[in-house]
Amino acid sequence: MLAALVRWSLNRPRLVAVAALLLLIYGGVVLAHAKFDVFPDFVPAQAEVQTEAPGLAAEQVEQLVTRPVEQAISGAAGVADVRSDSIQGLSIVTVVFKEGSDPYRARQVVAEALGEVTTGLPAGVKSPKVAPLTSSTMDLLKVGFTSDRMTPLQLRDLVQWTVRPKLLSAAGVARATVYGGEVRRLEVQVRPAELAARDLSLSDLLAAVRASTGVTGGGFIDTPQQRILIEPRGQAQSAADIAAAPIPGNGTGAPLRIGDVATVREAAAPDVGDAVIMGRPGVLISLSSQYGANTLDATHAVEAALEELRPALEAQGITVITGLHRPANFIGSALGGIGEDLLIGAALIALVLFLFMRDLRTVAISFVSIPLSLLTAVIVLDRLGSTINTMTLGGLAVALGVVVDDAVIDVENIVRRLRTRGDTPAAQVVLAASLEVRAPVIYATLVVALVLVPVLMLHGLQGAFFSPLAASFIVATAASLAVAIVITPPLALLFLRDARLEGEPAFLVRTKAWHETLLMRACGRPGGSVIAAALAALITVAGLTLFNSELLPSFREGHFVLSVAGPPGTSLGVMRRYGEAISHDLLAIPGIQSAEQQIGRAEGGEDTWGTEKSEFHVELKPGLSGAAQDKIQAEIHEVLDSYPGLETEVMTFLGDRIGESLTGETASLAVGVYGADLDTLDKVAADIAETLAKVPGAVDVKVQTPPQTPVVRVDLRFADLARYGLTPTDALDAVQTAYQGVEAAQVYDASRSIEIAVTAAPEVRQDPEAVGDLLVRSPGGAAVALKQVAHVYLTDGRTLISHQGGRPRQVVTTNPPPAKVLKVTAAAKAAIARSVKLPPGVYLDYSGTAEGTLAAQRELLFNVALAGAAVVALLLIAFRDGRAVSLILASAPFALVGGVAAVAVTGASLSLGSLVGFVTLFGVAARNAILLVSHLDHLIVEEGHDWSLATLAQATRERVTPILMTALVTALGVAPLAIQTGQAGREIQGPMAIVILGGLFTSTIASLILLPAMIWRFGRPTMR
C-alpha cells in the first residue's frame, strides 16, 4: 500500500504540486480567521450563584441564604465541589463541575436546582442569580472615567446608563461591571416627630410611597372600525411628584402629603464599592469576555464602541482612560513573540539546509514541509474548535525541527541515490530511495508521537495547558509524515530529475572523516560506551530528583494585580485615601503606565469583598523585558511595605487566575482549616499563620477570612416588646428603614430605573451610639426608644464566613515564588505538624500549585510508563528482536543527560514544561537510533553486506548527514524559544526548549558514537 501511494504520487508530480499550493493557500486563510487567545480555557466548568441580601450580616447571610443554596446545589448531577462565601449583604456560592462537563449544561443544572430555593428565602432577599459565563482569563478590558465638571452622581449615571449598554452590546462581552461614583436613588427621609404628630406609623408611609407611582396596562377599546389602545400614565417623574403624593387614611380629614412627614430628595445609595483611577476618584467599567470568545476580536469591538462614544464624553468634560487592564496586549506580544521565534527558527533551518545541500532546489523541497505541516496542523486544530494560543504555537515551534526531519531524511537519501544512479530512470531511483527510508521513518515518527501522548492525556490544570501543545506537536508531526510520503517524492522528481547534483561540501567530508576516527576508537573500547550510558542514567535520575520543581512559572504579562486590605471594618473613605496615595507612589515608578483601584464590590461583579478590601491593577509600559518586570515588581513591594497596617499581596493576573482555579484562593499555597465551631477555626488559623510566617520563603502570609469587625448588635427583649404593644417586626422594620432603607418602589425614566427608598435622615445614620435612641412606633400609636425594648451594644462580628463542601472553613495563604513552592509547602507541613495542636474535630488540607505539581508529575510519570510500554511494543513489531530494541532504549539516558546539564547550567527549575521537554527529547533520540539501526539492517539484509565493523562504519557514516542536519534544524528551531525564555509568551515553552537544546548535543553523540559502539559490542550477526 505504501509503495502504491508513493508510486501514485510520482506518476502525477504536477497535480501533487498544485494540491500542495492550494493547501498552503487554504491554510493561510484559516490562520487569518482563526480564534486567538493567550491560553486555552484552563478553568473547569463552573457556575457562580450570587444572592443579594440587603442589610443582613455575614452570620445571617450564611444561615438564611447560603446554606439553603448550598443544599439545593450540592446534590446536582456532575458537581465536583461547592465553595461559598457569606459577607454582609451578599451570598456567593461557586459550583465546580467534574472535568469534561459541558459548561452550558452545568449552568442549566444549577438553574434548575435553584428553582426550589427562591420561595424559601427571607423577605427582602433577592432571587439568586447565576453569574454570566465567562472565559478562563475573564478580564477583557478595564476602562476608567474621571471628570472635573461632573459630580460622582452624574458621572455614574452617564457611565451606567449610556456607556455600559453600548459596551455590553459589543460582540464577545459577557459582563460589564461598574465600580465607583454614586448610585442615584430617590430617598424618602422620614421625620419621626412629624410622623408621630399626625398619628401615623411607618407602614402608613411605606404604603403611601408604594402607591405614589405605578405602571399598569389600560387595555383597549374596540370601535366598529378600529381598535384604540388605552395608555394610562401614573409614573412619578421627580422627587417633587413623590412629595406631593397623598397619605390616605390619616384620620384628620385634612389632606396630608408624603412631603409633610418626610423629606424627598435625590441622594446616593449606600456604597458597597468605589474606584480610584490614576490616583483620582472616578468610575471604572470592568468588562469580561464570553466563554469561547475571540479575545482579540472582542477587545477590538469594545474599543470601536468606545471610540464612537469618546467625542460626546470628552465634550462633557469626561476623561476616558482605556487599557487599565488589556489582556489583548499580552496576547499580541506573546503570539507575536512566538511567531517571531517560528520565523527566525525557519530561517535558520533554511540556512542549515543550504549549507549541507548547497542546492536551492533541494533546500526548497525540504523546506516546504514546514509551512505545509504547520498549516495542516492549524487547519485540524481550527476544525476541532481549538484556539490559536501560546501553547499551540509553542507546540508548533518545538515541532519545527521534527517536521522538517522526514523531508530532510527523504531528500538526502534521494540526492545520495541520484548521484550514483547511472542509467537508471530518475522516477525509479526516487521511488526506491523513498521506500528505503519510509518504513523506519514511519516507525520513528510514531515513536515521537507516542512519547507525546502522555502529555496529551494529562488532566486538570496541567492538561488544559499542555494538551494543546502536545496535540499541535502530534498533528504537525503526522502532517510532516504525510508530506514526506505524498509530496516530497514527486517534488524531488519534478525538480531534481535533470539537475546536476554536486558532491558533499568539503566541511561535511572532513566531519565524516573525523567522526569515523572517533567511532573506531569507541568500537575498540565498547566497555566505555556501556559505562557512559550507565553514568548518564544515574546523572539523569539524580538531576531530576534534586532540582526545584514548579507547576507553572511566573508569567511576564506586563500587568500586576495588587491585593490591598485594611483592618476589618475599614470604611470606603479610608480605603479610597489609601488608594490615592498608593496610586501616586506607583505611578512614580519608571515603567508603570497606569494604575487603578477597585474597592469593595459591585452588584453582579466577580469580586465580592467587604469595604476593607481592594485590588489594584497596574499596567506596565509595553516592550519591557522579563528582568525589567521583575525589578518593577520588587519596587511595588517596597511601595506597599511603606504602608504599615495593610495586608498586601502582589501577583500577576494569570497567576491570580491559575491559583484561584486550583484552590479557590489567589495564593499559590492555601491551608484550609475545617471544623464546626468558627471561633475554634479562627484560633487555629491564627496559630497556623504565626507558624507559617516563620517558614523561610513563605511570603505574604495572611488569614483570608479575618474574623472581627465592629458590629452594633440589637437583641430584642420580647417581654418589653409585649409591654409596649410592639411586635418584633415593628422594631426590625424600624432599624432596617433607618439604616439600610426599604425599597418601596421604582421610577422609570427612559432607559433607566431609579429606586425609591424610605429611610432615615443622613445625620441619624452616621452615629453608632444613636441606634438605641431610634423611635419605634407601634400600630396603637406608642412611640418607644429602641433601647427600651432591646439590648443595643457595640461588639465584634464576622466580615466573611467561608464554606467548602458545606463545611465551615478558615483559610491561611502564602505566596512563595513558583520555584520554591514545593520546598515551602513541605517545610510548612512539617512546621505546622510540629507546632500547632489541632482541637478535636478540626482537620487541615493543603492545596495550591505544590499539590498540583506533585499530581501532575505523578500523572505524567504514570502516562509515560504506559507510553514506554507502547513504544517497546512498537519497536518489537518493527525489528522483531529484543536486543535491537534494548540497544535503542539504552542510548536514551545519554541523550537526556544533556537536558539535565542544560537545566543545571541555566539555573532553571524543573517545571512541567521541562518534563515535557525531556519526554520530547526521548522521542527525538529514539528516532535517530531507529533510523541508524534500520539502515544497518538495510545494508545487511537488502544490499548483502557482511556483518563487520566496516559495514557498521558505513551505515553510521551514511547517517551522519541526516543526523547532523536533523539535530541542527531541531536545535535552531527551538533556539529562539530557549534564548527568549522568561519573556512574554515563552514562560512555559522556554524551559522546554532549553531541555531539548541541551539534550540534542548529547543525543547526537549518543546516535553517532555511543550507539554504534554498543551495537558492535552487543549486536549479533544472526539478528540481521
Image: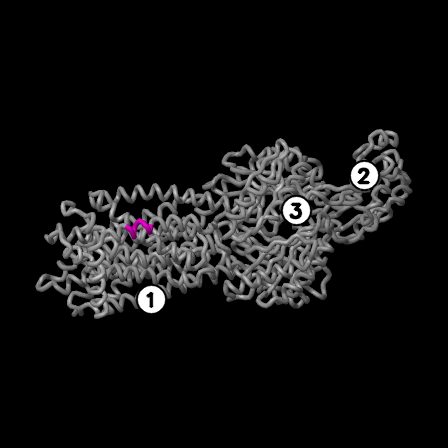
Q: Residues within 10 Å of mark 2 (few under 14, many from 20)?
A: some
Who comes first in sequence, dot 1 or dot 3?
3
The label on residue 419 is none
| Residue that mark 1 sits on | 348
Who comes first in sequence, dot 2 or dot 1?
2
Relative side of 760 to 517, left or right: right
Of 814 and 547, which appears nearest the observer? Answer: 547
Q: Which residues are magenta?
A: 531-536
Q: Nearer the viewer, mark 2 or mark 1?
A: 1
Label 2 – label 3 distance at C-alpha: 39 Å
Q: Is residue 391 above or below residue 65?
A: below
The label on residue 228 is 3
Q: Nearer the viewer, mark 1 or mark 3?
A: 1
Who comes first in sequence, dot 2 or dot 3?
2
Q: What type is the residue that disc 2 sits on?
A: Ser
| Residue that mark 2 sits on | 203
Indicate how the structure is coloured in the image: one colour
